[in-house]
Amino acid sequence: MTANRVLQLAFSHPLLLGQTGTLRGPQTEVGPMLLWLGLAGLAIGALSTTAYYLHRAALQRRLNSHPGLFDALCTLHGLDRGQKTLLRQLVRTRNPVYPAQVFTEPQWLESERLPAGLRAKKADLDKMHKMLFG
């Protein structure tokens, strides 16, 4: 590439030589742009607020429900994950009206009335029965 060609390319792109000149292109109106930015901000704010309140309602629904009460009672009695899973299996197989009944009515944990699938866990359920009901 010759020096002439380099200079031609440089002059065709004024920023290459550091020449700023007047780089003002067509004037941009700020008003409509601010309007669209404001509308976008309002839309983002509305979506964020809606998501917050939906999440909060879901948490309240979870806490103020029968499964929420069951989880709270498991935590209150200090049950570990395995014991909690065993109680959930018992609730699924015995199907009480309310899952929390296993904490208030000892007959749900009686080993004589266990379904066939939980007879292998009889010792764990007896231990849990003594822990919950003394």
Image (cartoon, grey):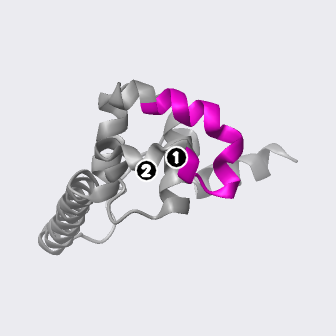
Q: Outermost residue, right direction?
A: 1
Give residue 111's quadrant in the image. Answer: top right
Circle 1 crowding by C-alpha within 10 Å: few under 14, some 14–19, many from 20: few
Element under disc 1: helix
* Position in image of residue 66 (x %, y %): 29, 57
Q: Is residue 102 left or right of residue 4?
A: left
Mark yes or no: residue 52 visible: yes
* Position in image of residue 31 (x %, y %): 11, 71
* Position in image of residue 30 (x %, y %): 16, 67
- Circle on res. 108: 2
Q: Amino acid at mark 2?
A: Trp
Depth check: give the residue in front, 122 or 20. Answer: 122
Residue at left offset 24%, top offset 70%? 27
Choose the circle earlier in sequence order: 2 or 1: 1
Residue at left offset 29%, top offset 29%? 76
Instruction: For marks 2 and 1, give the CA distance.
Output: 83 Å
- Where 104 sits versus 96, above or below? above
- Circle on res. 15: 1
Magenta stretch, main secondary structure, is helix
Depth check: give the residue in front, 62 or 3. Answer: 62
Residues tagged 2 and 1 counted as in contact (Cβ below 8 A): no
- Where 89 sits versus 33, above or below? above
* Position in image of residue 89 (x %, y %): 56, 52
Give residue 79's quadrant in the image. Answer: top left
Q: Which residues are magenta?
A: 112-129
Q: Is residue 97 left or right of residue 89?
A: left
Element under disc 2: helix
Residue at left offset 69%, top offset 56%? 116
Magenta region includes residue 106? no
